[in-house]
Image (cartoon, rainbow, N blue to C red):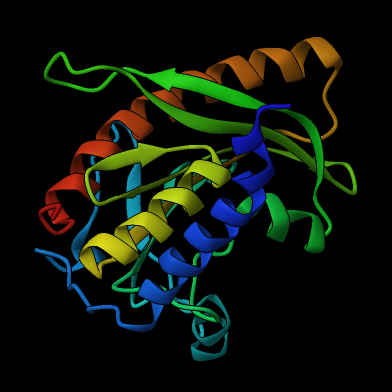
Amino acid sequence: MAPWLNWAPVGAMAAGVLLTSGLRTQHRVPPRQPIASLAVEVPGYQSQPLAISKEEQAVAGMSEFSLREFVRDSADRFTTYVGYYDYQVQGKTIHSPRNCLPGAGWETVRSGTMAVPVPGGGAPVAINRFLLANKGTQALVYYWYQGRGRVESNEYRVKWHLLRDAALHGRTEEALVRIVMPLPDGVTPAQLEAALARSDALALQVARKLVVEVERRLPVPA
């Protein structure tokens, strides 16, 4: 074993202490535009804002949010959510849906990531795609993290960027973006797959728009 490998754990620990210390002196960075004003146009759908109780806001810890329901008819609807954190410290960080959804009774049927093309010819961004089930009800969920010039799906990379930016720039502002599309109950497997394909196409359309609209409201990266 190379001698320097013996010091690798010590170096990693020292780096962690250095980066974590930056979390104690964070600057609150407000968005360029209110997050509550964020809304995207989806042809054929009407949207309206939904409320989140003060108690739920206290648990989630976001500084600002946009929660909207999109409806085409009584049986065709979905929601979008953007939760913005003007800074993050221990006890006030984004809660990963990967951890929260099982606690709410949802089980993962399928999971993975997908590339989303963005307008303007830039490189596609990676977001999470989950198919969830809860007592016979299924839903398609897209979510990602966006802030400080990045769109990220991987929670480990999100945490690394958070610690590094805290230490180097004293900034940890970030948004969690989520799309939830319920799927029809009481259908055959073939019908469910067809509904899932339609929901994927719609969710992809909405995700492309949300990436752009969220970026317009986020602070300029350091």
* Picture layout, residue 127 above or below residue 26: above
Which one is nearer the viewer's eye here, 52 or 8? 8
Residue 32 image-quadrant placement: bottom left
| Residue positioned 56% across, 45% down in the render | 156
* Picture layout, residue 39 above or below residue 65: above
Which one is nearer the viewer's eye here, 86 or 143? 86
Side of 121 where 12 appears, left or right? right
State the residue lying farthest toward the front.
3
Residue 154 image-quadrant placement: top right
In percent of width and height, residue 149 lies at 22, 44
Side of 23 where 147 appears, left or right? left
In percent of width and height, residue 85 lies at 35, 70
Q: Quadrant of the N terminus?
A: top right
Q: Quadrant of the C terminus?
A: bottom left
Please give the count of numbered marks on the rendered protein: 0
State the residue lying farthest toward the right.
135
The answer to whether residue 69 is seen in the rendering is no
The answer to whether residue 105 is seen in the rendering is yes
In percent of width and height, residue 61 lies at 47, 79
* Picture layout, residue 2 above or below residue 64: above
Side of 19 where 2 appears, left or right? right
| Residue positioned 80% across, 55% down in the render | 102
In percent of width and height, residue 205 lies at 35, 25
| Residue positioned 62% across, 56% down in the render | 10
| Residue positioned 54% across, 25% down in the render | 199
